[in-house]
Image (cartoon, rainbow, N blue to C red):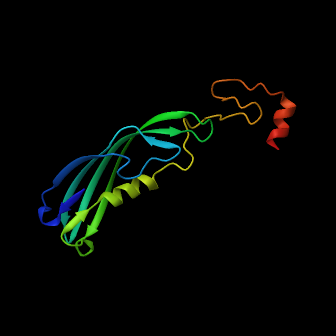
Amino acid sequence: MKVIVKKIGEKALELEEYITASQWDMDSEDIHFLDNIFIKCRFVRKKGEINVDVSLRFVRDIRCSRCLEWNKVESHDNFLLIYKDSEIKQGVLEVDADIREKILLDWPLKPLCKPDCRGICPGCGRNLNREKCICNSSSRVSLLR
């Protein structure tokens, strides 16, 4: 999203757009965006700065790091970006890189399908959220050591 700085005043300038995940190279091995990323920005000039209120909405398919099941996760995020007038080059403010960075920084390191996910048994390979372990107790203990 590019905005000509002269158009930003004390009265808010609101812009909306949809970005595909492929435009920003957002998909990974364990996370796939299922829809476009909706971005709404509200630009306001205040004392030598431009404040950008950003609102995001997107849906991702995330693979749980414990049980390896795919889960659809809907995300909403709101945050503020602040730019000093002196940082803006050639009269154009471009916020895409900063919004993309914020999404990536909020990426879960170990995504879970639910907080109490029991994962996969290292012995029999069963998803312990759905099935009971079929290992005998002595082999399970030796595998966990």
Give me the residue at 35% from left, 60% from top.
98
Toward the right, the furthest residue is 138
Give me the residue at 29% from left, 60% from top.
95
Give me the residue at 34% from left, 56% from top.
99
Residue 140 horizontal side relative to residue 70, left or right: right
Does 52 sit above or below residue 72?
Answer: below
Residue 131 horizontal side relative to residue 23, left or right: right
Residue 18: image x %, image y %? 27, 45
Residue 120: image x %, image y %? 68, 34
Quarter of the image containing the C terminus? top right
Q: Nearer the viewer, residue 129 or 37?
A: 37
Give me the residue at 60% from left, 35% from top.
116
Query: What number of labels is visible?
Result: 0
Q: Which of the 4 quarters of the picture holds residue 65?
A: top right
Residue 97: image x %, image y %? 34, 60
Residue 19 horizontal side relative to residue 60, left or right: left
Residue 93: image x %, image y %? 23, 64
Quarter of the image containing the N terminus? bottom left
Toward the bottom, the furthest residue is 86
Q: Which of the 4 quarters of the picture holds residue 115?
A: top right
